């Protein structure tokens, strides 16, 4: 079965610092990758997605992620974080099955940005 | 309308109660999903409906009974739940391509369920 690992469980940064959150997956077939964000008290929102093509994908709010197939990784980056980026970030892998699409989430990274 | 709505927002129920969670979307999506999210944990898939038919059941106990009465509605019927079933229950929807290709899922705000 596929799995997703996020090694940074808690990250604390100062405003304007650069961010990189790690995501590794284990699945030998074609993967479709996502980063979702969950702001305090709000629902899950899609930050960005990778299906195919350019492995460097850009999302909303200045976030980007790079798919490195050889490393089974899909790390999330942002050059300069803001206080409003404080949230929980989930990496997810979508596997296409005969019965439907199965989305498996990583354990999440709680990001706190301090002023 | 790019919203998935869920009602109620909060639900408290006893172990002998029967209750239902409701999810609605008007984006024309033909796949709908139920997830369970415990505190400080990622969402875990429970059920997938595709074209109103149950296509995936992730070995969920029978005390959870999903229903998809039409393409816009998804229900989760609850009966004889246990305190450990207390969690945030998330609904999501997505389009379905003819080729079965990948598409993003849109999530609702969830129903926070407490079982006493």
Image (tube, grey):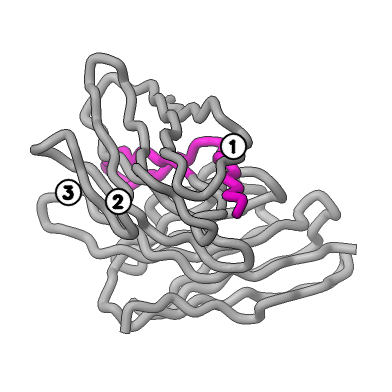
Q: On the same chain: label 1 and label 2?
A: yes
Q: Are marks 3 and 2 on the same chain?
A: no
| Residue pointed to by mark 1 | A11
Q: Residues in magenta? A: A90-115
Q: Is residue B95 above or below residue A87?
A: below
Return the residue at label 3: B101
x 30%, y 54%: residue: A62
- Whether residue A104 is visible here, answered yes or no, is yes
Which one is nearer the viewer's eye here, B75 or A68?
Answer: A68
Q: Relative to residue A101, is residue A16 drawn left or right? A: right
Q: Position of residue A2 (x, y in %)?
A: 41, 27
Q: Foreground mark, 1 or 2?
A: 1
Dividing the picture into quarters, in which one does residue A76 lie?
top left
The label on residue A48 is 2
Say left or right for A76 vs A11. Answer: left
In the rendered structure, does residue B114 fall within the stretch colored magenta?
Answer: no
Q: Chain of mark 1?
A: A
Looking at this view, name the residue that lies furthest to the top: A70
The first of marks 1 and 2 along the sequence is 1
Structural crowding at the residue carrying mark 2, measured as other residues with C-alpha within 10 Å and reported as few (<14), some (14–19) or many (≥20) = many
Tag 2, which secondary structure? Answer: strand
Q: CA distance from mark 3 to mark 2?
A: 17 Å
């Amino acid at each position: 079965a596929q799995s997703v690992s996020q090694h940074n469980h808690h990250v604390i940064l100062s405003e304007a610092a650069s961010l990189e959150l790690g995501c590794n997956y284990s699945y030998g077939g074609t993967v479709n990758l996502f980063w979702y964000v969950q702001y305090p008290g709000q629902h899950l929102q899609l930050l960005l997605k990778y299906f195919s093509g350019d492995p460097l994908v850009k999302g909303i709010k200045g976030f980007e992620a790079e798919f490195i197939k050889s490393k089974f990784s899909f790390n999330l980056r942002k050059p300069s974080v803001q206080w409003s980026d404080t949230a929980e970030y989930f990496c997810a892998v979508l596997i296409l099955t005969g019965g439907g699409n199965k989305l498996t989430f990583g354990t999440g990274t709680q990001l706190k940005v301090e002023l | 309308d790019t919203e998935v709505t869920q009602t109620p927002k909060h639900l408290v129920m006893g172990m002998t109660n029967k209750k239902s969670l409701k999810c609605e979307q008007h984006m024309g999506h033909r796949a709908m999903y139920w997830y369970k999210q415990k505190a400080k944990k990622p969402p875990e898939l429970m059920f997938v409906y595709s074209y109103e038919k149950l296509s995936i059941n992730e070995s969920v106990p029978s005390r959870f009974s999903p229903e998809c009465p039409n393409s816009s509605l998804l229900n989760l019927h609850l009966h004889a739940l246990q305190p450990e079933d207390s969690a945030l229950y998330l609904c999501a929807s997505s389009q379905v391509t003819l080729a079965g290709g990948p598409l993003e899922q849109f999530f609702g705000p969830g129903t926070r369920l407490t079982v006493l």
